[in-house]
């Protein structure tokens, strides 16, 4: 919820649309978690890039194989 407030989504339709797109892409990782590349820092992590330059956000996540998450 912090990013929602940070980008002003409560008072800007463009920011709210952007935020909904980010949430949609993050939720889609449940179905295709391996689609994003591994991070250069840690091979056990992956990262999803979202947005357009110069405002690209990086979502770092780990696939929990044993829990299918």
Image (cartoon, helix red, strand yellow):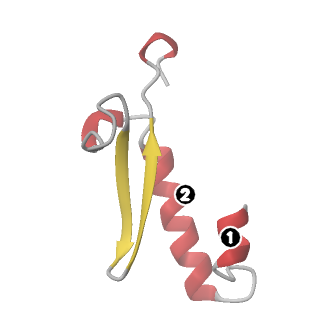
Give the numbered dot on residue 4: 1
In the drawing, does residue 52 fall left or right of residue 28? left
Q: Residues within 10 Å of mark 1 (few under 14, many from 20)?
A: some
Q: Secondary structure at mark 1?
A: helix
The residue sitting at 35% across, 28% down in the picture is: 44
Quadrant in the picture for residue 35? top left
Quarter containing the N terminus:
bottom right
Reply above or below: 57 against 28.
below
Pick whichever, 16 or 63, lies toward us.
63
For this orientation, the residue located farthest to the front is 41
Q: How many marks?
A: 2
Front tag of 1 and 2 = 1
Pick whichever, 50 or 13, lies toward us.
50
> Residue 12 location in percent, x, y?
66, 89
Residue ID for mark 2 = 23
Reply above or below: 60 against 34.
below
The residue sitting at 35% across, 60% down in the picture is: 49
In the drawing, does residue 3 fall left or right of residue 25? right
Query: Which tag, 1 or 2, sits closer to the chain's start?
Result: 1
> Residue 32 location in percent, x, y?
33, 36
Reply above or below: 45 against 55.
above
Q: Secondary structure at mark 2?
A: helix
In the drawing, does residue 44 fall left or right of residue 18? left
Quadrant in the picture for residue 36? top left
The residue sitting at 56% across, 66% down in the picture is: 20
> In 3D space, how far apart are the residues under numbered discs 1 and 2 (Cα atoms)?
10 Å
């Amino acid at each position: 919820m912090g990013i929602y407030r940070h980008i002003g989504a409560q008072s800007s339709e463009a920011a709210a649309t952007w935020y909904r797109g980010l949430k949609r892409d993050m939720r889609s990782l449940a179905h295709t978690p391996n689609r994003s590349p591994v991070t250069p820092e840690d091979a056990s992590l992956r990262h999803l890039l979202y947005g357009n330059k110069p405002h690209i956000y990086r979502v770092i996540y780990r696939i929990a194989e044993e829990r299918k998450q």
